Amino acid sequence: MQLEGKNAIVTGGGRNIGRAISIALANKGVNVAINFHKNDKKAQETVEKLEEIGVKSLKIQADVRNFDQVKNMTNRVKKSLGGIDILVNNAGISGQNSTIEKINIEEWKNVIEVNLNGVFNCCKAVEAELRKNKGKVVNISSIAGKMGGSIGCHYAASKAGVIGLTFRLATELAPQVTVNAIAPGPVDTELLSPEIKKKLSGLTPFGRIAKPEEIAHTVVYLLENDYVSGEVIDVNAARYMD
Ligand SMILES: NC(=O)c1ccc[n+]([C@@H]2O[C@H](COP(=O)([O-])OP(=O)(O)OC[C@H]3O[C@@H](n4cnc5c(N)ncnc54)[C@H](OP(=O)(O)O)[C@@H]3O)[C@@H](O)[C@H]2O)c1
């Protein structure tokens, strides 16, 4: 897909990985709607950065757990930008506890609602528009969805669920829409504590965790390619090989 002039929604696009994805898309000439949940200020800063780059951008508050809010968001984006070609499902949370002993049912449900139901809600809200525009979906899963990881069973299950959703939608929305996922290893953002970042840096042969821009670069690759669909791209610097 030629990205210049296309319109995208990036969920959780205001900060960290979502911001890096939004900037990478803007650098390719894509107009970007920045979805945020609580952090209006960061979303506003990102919108301003994108406008400096020279594309159209707007911020929209919507909780991805809530289908009505997601639907309103997509209607507003269609009205403001004239259509939607790209959905990047990036919004995600980690939860407070990491063991099944400590994770209660509310925490379990909340992580699943944001990380998995949120992706379903956004895909459902835009699928007809994406089919019409021969669009693309990129879902940000995680290495935890493939090998468990250390954040917690709720996080691992939600990210594994995103991979299953990606596989099914890749066939269901073919041939008009490609649907792919990225499974990053640890990335240098606020999602991980400084102690965890230090520990995880030592686990990769590269001796460091990823930069948000390295995930964003992979998103651009998947958007530019019209024949990769139903894939999960690992971005983890040979983590499995060590
Ligand atoms: N960091 C890592 O090591 C790592 C590794 C693998 C995968 N990932 C995945 O990459 C994605 C981004 O991670 P990150 O490290 O950039 O996380 P982050 O810094 O904690 O940012 C999370 C983003 O999700 C948004 N969000 C949270 N709950 C939301 C909701 N209910 N509705 C809408 N938006 C919501 C936040 O919006 P507000 O700021 O407005 O609240 C924020 O923009 C996540 O899906 C994460 O699981 C991260």
Image (spheres, rainbow, N blue to C red):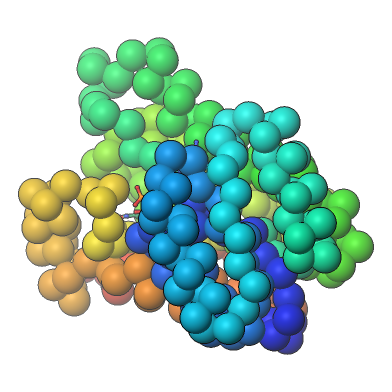
Query: Quick check: 171 above or below 3?
Result: above
Relative to 222, is 1 on the left or the right?
Answer: right
Q: Is residue 227 above or below residue 183?
A: below
In this view of the protein, can residue 144 be seen by the observer?
Answer: yes
Res 146 seen here: no
Q: For the C terminus, which image quadrant?
A: bottom left
In percent of width and height, residue 80 lies at 76, 60
Q: Position of residue 128 (x, y in %)?
A: 87, 52
Q: Quadrant of residue 122?
A: top right
Residue at the image point whose x is 27% and y is 57% from the top: 189
Image quarter for residue 8? bottom right
Rendered location of residue 41, percent (x, y): 39, 52
Q: Which residue is at a point 45% across and 25% down the rendered structure image?
A: 110
Quadrant where the N terminus sits is: bottom right
Instruction: Give the residue drawn at x 72%, y 31%.
Output: 68
- 135 on left or right of 187: right
Q: Quadrant of residue 4?
A: bottom right
Q: How many marks?
A: 0
Name the residue located 37 percent from the left edge and 21 percent from the top edge.
107
Image coordinates for residue 191, horizontal then vertical, percent: 28, 48
